[in-house]
Image (tube, rainbow, N blue to C red):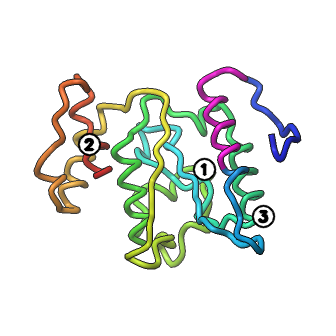
Amino acid sequence: RDNGVANGQPTDQGSKYAIELCALYNVVDRMPLGPEGQALFNVGLMLSNGNPSSNKGGYPLHAFTALDATGKSSLKAAIRSIANTSEFKANQPTFALMMHEAYLYYKGLAPRVGHLNNPWDSRAVSGGKYSTPAAHSCGRNYVIFIANGAPNSGEDADAQPLLQGLGGAAAVSPIVDPNLATLEANWADEYAR
């Protein structure tokens, strides 16, 4: 719903996928504007590459955008464009490599695979590097990670050296949680700290 008016709902209503899209759309729709209609938030949308066997990682479907009325409309249109098809859907997505791509985006570095998926938002890249939304190091920047299944454990060998290359405590001290069972080896949680 967009301000109470129905808007092109997915045909697979009730699926986890459709519920996620609906929730995401409604969150964007309800994000407040400033007193004069100005944006209070910059939001982008990154998805898992639809074919993890090639181009493992994530890509920006919608570049970071100031969420004024125009930005909200643009982001909601991008959310509505997501279909339950192979170009948007990834079985066992590569969570850690997606987090790595998000890191590159925030740091304003060159994309690893974020520019190889189709569709991707070319506005996210300028001069061969991501256009970082984190212009000020003291600003608050967040990654909100939404998933409805387990990660692909086949990415672990790819993700670990990338994470180690970034340095920091996460590279040398993995998070140990017996509740994660076989998923404990995935590096996405180490990227998140």
Image coords of residue 113 (percent x, y): 44, 55
The residue most toward the left is 172
Whichever of callouts 3 and 2 sits on the residue coming sooner in the sequence is: 3
Image coords of residue 24 (percent x, y): 63, 42
Dot in front, 3 or 1:
3
Q: What main secondary structure does the magenta stretch of the protein show? A: helix
Whichever of callouts 3 and 1 sits on the residue coming sooner in the sequence is: 3
C-alpha distance separating marks 3 and 2 = 37 Å
Would you call the spot at circle 3 few (<14 residues within 10 Å), some (14-19), or many (20 or more)? some
- Residue at 74%, 43% (x, y): give it: 80
Q: How many labels does the image show?
A: 3
The residue most toward the front is 35
Would you call the spot at circle 2 few (<14 residues within 10 Å), some (14-19), or many (20 or more)? many
Q: What stretch is highlighted in magenta?
A: 13-27
**Cβ–Cβ below 8 Å for labels 3 and 2?**
no
Q: Name the residue under label 2.
A: 187
- 150 or 67: which is nearer to us? 67
Q: Quadrant of residue 108?
A: bottom left
Dot in front, 2 or 1:
2
- Residue at 69%, 36% (x, y): give it: 22
Amino acid type indicated by mark 1 = Asn
Q: Name the residue under label 3.
A: 69
Would you call the spot at circle 1 few (<14 residues within 10 Å), some (14-19), or many (20 or more)? few
Dot in front, 3 or 2:
3
C-alpha distance separating marks 3 and 1 = 27 Å
Q: Name the residue under label 1.
A: 118
Is residue 31 highlighted in magenta? Answer: no
Check the image and report above or below for 149 versus 5. Answer: above
Question: Quick check: 162 left or right of 20?
Answer: left
